[in-house]
């Protein structure tokens, strides 16, 4: 299975997907130091620098598009410009890329869009930004959408780093099962929304 990474950072999502058996067919990251890390660890993966100009079929079709769009405008530590902010507004380019790929493949690809961001996404604009995100996902053809707040402490890392993980399923009612965590995991987060 193929995956494309947008706003890749240093490739955390990519490493997880690679370890799960995916082929990473393309990455997009503008930050020069992060690009250097990606080139070192993923030397054979095509890397582009601007999500704003990337066409949805630039890397070809993929089962999964993933990424963590910038959080600065959503974080409770920031000015909270929300999805209308210059940085967090890159989310709309994610959606454009998904729609372009779906159009070019007669809605065959992608099967999933996997996003992550800070928990402030849920409360930005008194919840209006998260509703807008859900509406955009539905408008792009997502059949099921699920989300959950995950804390890195639940994976054994001695650091609290909470993130909202969102899965949009374009093929049929599996988004919730993708986010399911076993009952035996320590620090298992609460149930997701759908």
Image: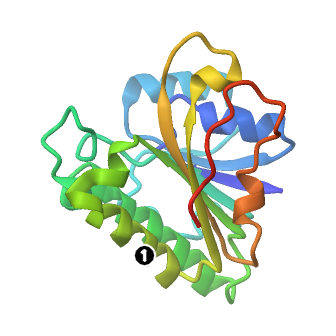
x and y percent of residue 29 in the render? 45, 41
Q: Position of residue 190 (x, y in %)?
A: 61, 44
Q: Which residue is mark 1?
A: 136
* Residue 189 visible from this viewpoint: yes
Residue 6 visible in the current orientation: no
The quarter holding residue 60 reads: bottom right
Quadrant of the drawing holding the C terminus? bottom right
Q: Is residue 115 above or below residue 130?
A: above
Q: Residue at x 63, y 51 (%)?
A: 191
Left or right position of 158 against 187 = left
Q: How is the image coloured?
A: rainbow
Residue 144 picture location, percent across and down: 64, 74
The outermost residue toward the left is: 79
User: Which residue shows up at 56% across the image and 61% down it?
Assistant: 193
Which residue ends up furthest to the bottom in the rendered image? 106
User: Around disc 1, counting alpha carbons within 10 Å, would you say few (fewer than 14), some (14 to 19), or many (20 or more)?
Assistant: some
Secondary element under disc 1, as helix, strand or loop, is: helix
Q: Nearer the viewer, residue 167 or 54?
A: 167
Answer above or below: position of 39 versus 131: above
Q: Which quarter of the picture shows residue 76?
A: top left
Between 37 and 177, which is closer to the camera in this rendering?
A: 177
Which residue is nearer to you in this view: 162 or 138? 162
Which image quadrant: the N terminus? Answer: bottom right
Q: Residue at x 27, y 66 (%)?
A: 128
Q: Left or right: where does residue 21 sit relative to residue 191?
A: right
> x, y percentage for residue 73?
23, 46
């Amino acid at each position: 299975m193929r995956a494309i990474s947008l706003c890749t950072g240093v490739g955390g999502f990519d490493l997880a997907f690679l370890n799960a058996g995916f082929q990473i067919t393309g990455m997009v990251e503008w930050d020069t130091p992060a690009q250097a890390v990606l080139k070192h660890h993923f030397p054979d993966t095509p890397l582009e620098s601007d999500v704003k100009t990337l066409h949805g079929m630039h890397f070809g079709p993929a089962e999964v598009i993933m990424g963590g769009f910038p959080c600065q405008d959503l974080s409770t530590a920031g000015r909270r410009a929300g999805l209308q902010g210059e940085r967090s507004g890159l989310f709309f380019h994610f959606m454009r890329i998904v729609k372009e790929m779906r159009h070019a493949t007669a809605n065959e690809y992608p099967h999933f869009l996997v996003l992550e961001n800070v928990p402030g996404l849920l409360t930005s604009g008194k919840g209006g930004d998260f509703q807008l995100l859900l509406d955009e996902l539905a408008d792009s053809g997502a059949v099921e959408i699920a989300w959950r707040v995950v804390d890195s402490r639940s994976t054994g890392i001695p650091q609290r780093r909470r993130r909202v993980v969102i899965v949009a399923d374009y093929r049929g009612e599996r988004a919730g099962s993708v986010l399911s965590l076993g009952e035996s995991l320590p620090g298992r987060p609460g149930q997701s929304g759908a």
